[in-house]
Image (tube, rainbow, N blue to C red):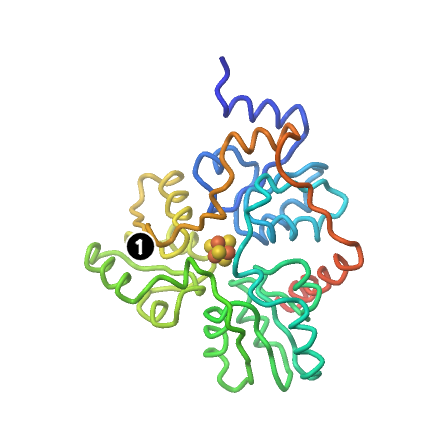
């Protein structure tokens, strides 16, 4: 009898489905994916394929980003309940009101936002491109949404700019404390510490580097020393799976678990490929075009 991995591979081939998986996904999903990476890399990589049907193993805004860039493809979110709490910590109506009240302000949205929010902002940024893009924005005021930690990281880099930071946060990265870093350093005194800038400033200040998921992976692979990985635990799981010969440690593994990223299991994935589970993502065309403009602006400035 075929095991589930074989059934998934067979169903994928029969239906011509491309599987995208964010690096926060569980190792068994990563192993079955055609492309892995962070959310924007996945949306861009998907654009370059001929696939007509795509399953995005991640949360809703990631599937929306794929659809924004590839409207002609059928994009399926296998677990429709998988959302990102941070992506909705400001409403599109609130952004619209802010812009009416502050017409000279430029609204910068982290890519981890819904399509409806992307449609209201002026430019998107990823955690890797945020500094480079904000540096180029000349405006009396910049509103950075929705993550206060990444926003503060950017604001501190440009004290000469008037940057207003929205009060949203990633509940997973925001719960890491300075004590967690000190404990991990005590347990692995020779290791370097890499964290995501969605963590609080006092956490970032204690680390050897802060960067996006892709930057953390690059840093960890280039490091001659062992590395403590301070982002969602899927990244350390992924690195350990792919590079068992190198030394990687989880930072606060009980805290750094995003439950929304773990809704997809192999059963759900197989059902979604067979059309028995999941949601086909639909975005109103006018809204999609507006949302894409903020991504195009990110690519222009980045
Ligand atoms: S880890 Fe944080 S930012 Fe990423 S999907 Fe989960 S809640 Fe959202």
Place residue 192 in its image quadrant. Answer: bottom left
The residue furthest right is 286
In percent of the image, x 29 and y 46: which residue is there? Answer: 247
Q: Percent from the top left, x then y, of residue 142? A: 60, 79
User: What element does badge 1 sit on?
Assistant: loop
Is the residue marked by circle 1 packed among few (<14), some (14-19), or many (20+) residues within 10 Å? many
Q: Percent from the top left, x then y, of residue 226? A: 28, 52
Is the distance from the Cβ of mark 1 to the nearest ligand 1 atom less than 8 Å? no
Location of mark 1 (residue)? 252
User: Number of numbered discs present?
Assistant: 1
In percent of the image, x 46 and y 57: which residue is there? Answer: 215
For residue 217, side relative to residue 71 (left or right): left
Q: Quadrant of the C terminus?
A: bottom right
280 or 70: which is nearer to us? 280
Place residue 181 in its image quadrant. Answer: bottom left
Place residue 209 in its image quadrant. Answer: bottom left
Indicate whether 171 appears above or below 145. above
Q: Percent from the top left, x then y, of residue 167? A: 50, 72
Indicate whether 197 appears above or below 38. below
The residue furthest top is 1
Q: Visible in this render: residue 69?
A: yes
Q: Visible in this render: residue 214?
A: no
Q: Percent from the top left, x then y, of residue 59? A: 56, 49
For residue 219, side relative to residue 188 (left or right): right
């Amino acid at each position: 009898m075929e095991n589930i991995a074989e059934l998934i591979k067979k169903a994928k081939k029969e239906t011509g489905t491309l599987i995208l998986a964010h690096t926060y996904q569980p190792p068994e999903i990563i192993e079955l994916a055609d492309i892995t990476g962070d959310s924007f890399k996945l949306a861009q990589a998907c654009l370059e394929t001929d696939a007509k049907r795509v399953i995005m193993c991640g949360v809703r805004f990631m599937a929306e980003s794929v659809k924004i860039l590839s409207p002609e493809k059928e994009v399926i979110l296998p677990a429709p309940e998988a959302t990102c709490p941070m992506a909705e910590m400001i409403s599109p109506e609130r952004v619209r009101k802010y812009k009416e009240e502050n017409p000279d302000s430029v609204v910068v949205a982290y890519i981890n936002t819904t399509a409806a929010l992307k449609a209201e902002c002026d430019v998107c940024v990823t955690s890797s491109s945020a500094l480079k893009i904000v540096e180029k924005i000349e405006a009396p005021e910049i509103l950075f949404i929705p993550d206060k930690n990444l926003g503060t990281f950017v604001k501190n880099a440009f004290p000469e700019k008037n940057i207003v930071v929205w009060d949203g946060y990633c509940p997973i990265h925001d719960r890491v404390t300075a004590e967690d870093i000190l404990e991990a350093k005590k347990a692995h005194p020779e290791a370097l510490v890499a964290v995501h800038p969605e963590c609080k400033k006092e956490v970032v200040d204690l680390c050897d580097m802060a960067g996006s998921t892709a930057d953390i992976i690059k840093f960890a692979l280039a490091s001659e020393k062992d590395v403590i990985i301070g982002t969602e635990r899927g990244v350390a799981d992924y690195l350990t799976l792919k590079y068992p010969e190198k030394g990687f440690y989880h930072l606060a593994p009980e805290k750094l678990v995003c439950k929304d990223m773990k809704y997809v299991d192999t059963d759900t994935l197989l059902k979604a490929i067979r059309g028995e589970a999941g949601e086909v993502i639909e975005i109103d065309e006018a809204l999609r075009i507006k949302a894409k403009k903020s991504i195009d602006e990110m690519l222009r400035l980045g």
